[in-house]
Image (cartoon, grey):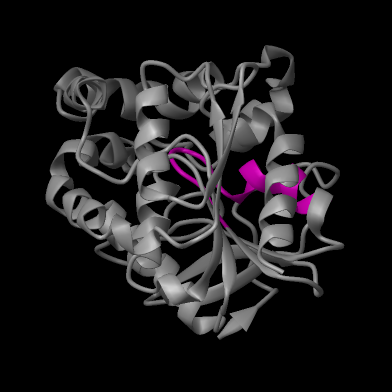
Amino acid sequence: MYNTTHKRPFEVSQAEYPFQDRWFQYKNAQIHYVDEGETGPTVLLLHGNPTWSYLYRNVIKGLKDQCRLIAIDYPGFGMSQAPAGYKFTPQEQAEAVQTLINSLQLQNFILVVQDWGGPIGISYAVKKPDNIRAIVLMNTWAWSASVPQYLFSLVIGGSIFGKWLITKKNFFAKTILPNGIFHKEKITDELRNAYLAPFQTANSRLRTWIFPRSIRKAKSWLTEIESQLSRLANTPAQILWGKQDEPGFRPKEMKKWQSFLKLHETETLDDASHFVQEDRPDRLIANIKRAIERTK
């Protein structure tokens, strides 16, 4: 079921992303993930839109001697194929992640989430809280949209203009992503190319439009997750919040997480925006280490 021989659809810097590719058969597609480190607790790293496991490269390099780190590329993202008939909804992506968890028989693992990785990962956590050792959570949500989120969804995910921007101009990967990184000196050509590579055609970019559209369209699913968040009240949690992410993810969302995750420790970052993994991988590494320490 798992192999290391499937061909990459594109190349990235070996120095930046020095990991062995792993693949598993999901329906009729090859799904890509990395699985680095053989000792210590297991850490599952979930990305959002329009990113992939490359987002966690610095965290994996920094912790692979202390943990087992697994980072999946959702179907249709990064190096992963998508099964025939796949709609790229967050519900389907959550199902793919759950399949990986079950297939690898992951137990008592630390769940690391950000952006759409939040509802995708938390939808599993609320069902199986006893299998979650700790949660490390960055700028994300798992409930029906706030007013700014709804308006963003309406403009970008609900209009012909928004669809044109994304499919014809690659707006998410080319513009929104770098705008979500506070430390502009980190936005190198190498980084841009790594995030642009999966989306070379208008058809491939459509999946990055489904996510903002789903902020509204997946309301019932998000509401269902929220109704179960109390099941995580006794789960140790590290909240790491980029403060330069407004109006997308504001302190209001952070405080809502704090109200659900009773055993939280929170760190806010003045020099991080939406993609905390790019801005401050050092602090994410520190928070994962702290989650390990708290749950020994």
- Which residue is depicted at the point 30% across and 41% down? 211
The residue at 68%/59% (across/down) is: 294
User: 25 or 106: which is nearer to us?
Assistant: 106
Asked if residue 48 lies in the magenta stretch, the reply is: yes
Decide if residue 102 is on the left or right side of residue 240: left
Residue located 72% across and 29% down the image: 190
Q: Left or right: where does residue 122 sit relative to residue 11?
A: left
Inspect this view and state whether residue 11 appears: no
Q: Residue 58 appears in which quarter of the rendering?
A: top right
Q: Is residue 23 visible?
A: yes
Range drawn in magenta = 45-61
Vertical comparison of 45 with 192: above or below: below
Could you tell me residue 63's position as x and y percent?
80, 55
Q: Is residue 13 above or below residue 161?
A: below
Picture quadrant where residue 29 is located: bottom left
How many numbered discs sit on the rendered protein? Answer: 0
Residue pictured at 56% horizontal, 78% vertical:
106
User: Would you say 267 lies left or right of 139 here?
Assistant: right
Left or right, 57 with reference to 203: right
Residue 46 position, x and y percent, is 52, 53
Picture coordinates of residue 275, whole percent (x, y): 56, 30
Residue 41 part of the magenta segment: no
Quadrant of the drawing holding the N terminus: bottom right
Q: Is residue 198 above or below residue 154?
A: below
**Residue 151 placed where, x, y %?**
19, 20
Q: Quadrant of the C terminus?
A: bottom right
Q: Nearer the viewer, residue 82 or 90?
A: 90
